[in-house]
Amino acid sequence: MPRHVDTVSDDQLEKSCGQRRKQVDALQLGPRKRLSVTDPLVHYGRHFGRTVHALCNFQALLTNGILRMGELADTPEENFTAEERREHRIFQELLKSVAGLEERLMQGGDDEVDIVAELLTKGASGARGDDTKSLKGSVLDWITPKGQNLVPPLARNVKIDRGFHHERTGALLCPAGIDWSNPETKTKLRSGKIIVTGDQWPLFLYADYRYDPEDPWNGLFQSALLVCAYKHVFTSPSSVDREPKATRSGNARIHGMTRVTLPSVAYIATQVRFALTSSLFTDSERFYNSILDVFEDPDEKQEVDNLVVWWNRQVFPSYSTAQRPLAKNSALARIREKRAQMKELVSVPDGGSGSA
């Protein structure tokens, strides 16, 4: 999942400052710089990248966000594109998660914005790199059947033999709807005649690695492999093979995380996909964003809400059963529905419906 981007000179960065809103996409990775000073913002950047948005260009996110709060504060919401509205929501999430950040940004100048962006970028990039390195070897343990060995064996620190070159990783990476057991298909995937893009989701996302074309949501994002990787990153590597405890120290506990976020599921899926592949170029941004698009689609809300409940039960033992979604067509669901209808009627002023 790591992405290597050429750095830019100070002159080039200064020249582009006035044009950042138009030229830079805040939800794509931007230039990275090494910083030697430790700052709490690095800590926040690590968690933000894992749980809110993994591929932010913080420089553009902050610049555009400040514009929205200042010069563009009176601009109607409908004047912004869907992507700009999404970007601003992420900016607001950042302000909520870092105490005092809004005041620091609004009172500081361009130099302060640059410093904050660099520190956040350092944190997010560092966490991404650490997770990539850690998962590279661990993922082999999770995909090896118990009591068996991978044939041929795979090296823990080298990826060249993974991907479609290996039977096990190839089967897991095979896009849903494509038959890996077909020798001709397998040959074309290995040779590159069939090119897999980031929005062709692999079988490893599904529970038991089974895809039902008649019900594509069935088991989606519920594989044991994803759960293992999620626990490895968020609740500690040792929690993967045993019942997690609320007192366990891990990234989730360090950052006060008690619920799964949807972007964190997309992040883990992207990391696992990268760990299974043989290539450094995996269309990871398209893969990650395609998952977020589905998670944020209003038409998929019911399935997504159910998925969040499922994930919280897998990862956080203290998750309340009171959070369970209501069963469709149940009496309680009907009561809630009727109450919502009554509230809607009360809120409509006399004559608002146009009826006599």
Image: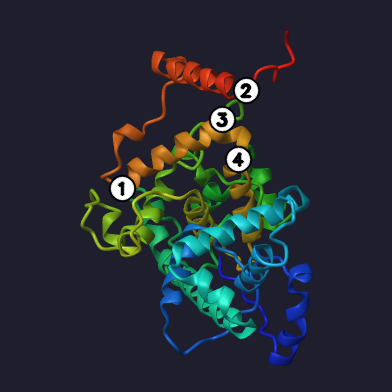
Residue matched to label 3 = 212
Separation of residues labelled 4 and 3 (CA atoms) = 9 Å
The residue at 62%/22% (across/down) is 348
- Asked if residue 213 can be seen in this view, the reply is yes
- Residue 88 falls left or right of residue 257: right
Separation of residues labelled 4 and 1 (CA atoms) = 29 Å
Which three-letter amino acid code belongs to the residue tagged 3? Asp
Callout 2 secondary element? loop
Residue furthest to the top: 356
Callout 4 secondary element? loop
Circle 2 crowding by C-alpha within 10 Å: few under 14, some 14–19, many from 20: few
Q: Height in image: 65 above or below 180?
A: below
Image coords of residue 77 (percent x, y)? 71, 50
Residue matched to label 4 = 176
Nearer the observer, disc 3 or disc 1? Answer: 1
Callout 1 secondary element? loop
Mark sitting on residue 348: 2
The residue at 49%/43% (across/down) is 221
Which three-letter amino acid code belongs to the residue tagged 4? Ala
Q: Quick check: marks 3 and 1 in contact, CB under 8 Å?
A: no
Residue matched to label 1 = 316
Where is the N terminus found, in terms of image quarters?
A: bottom right
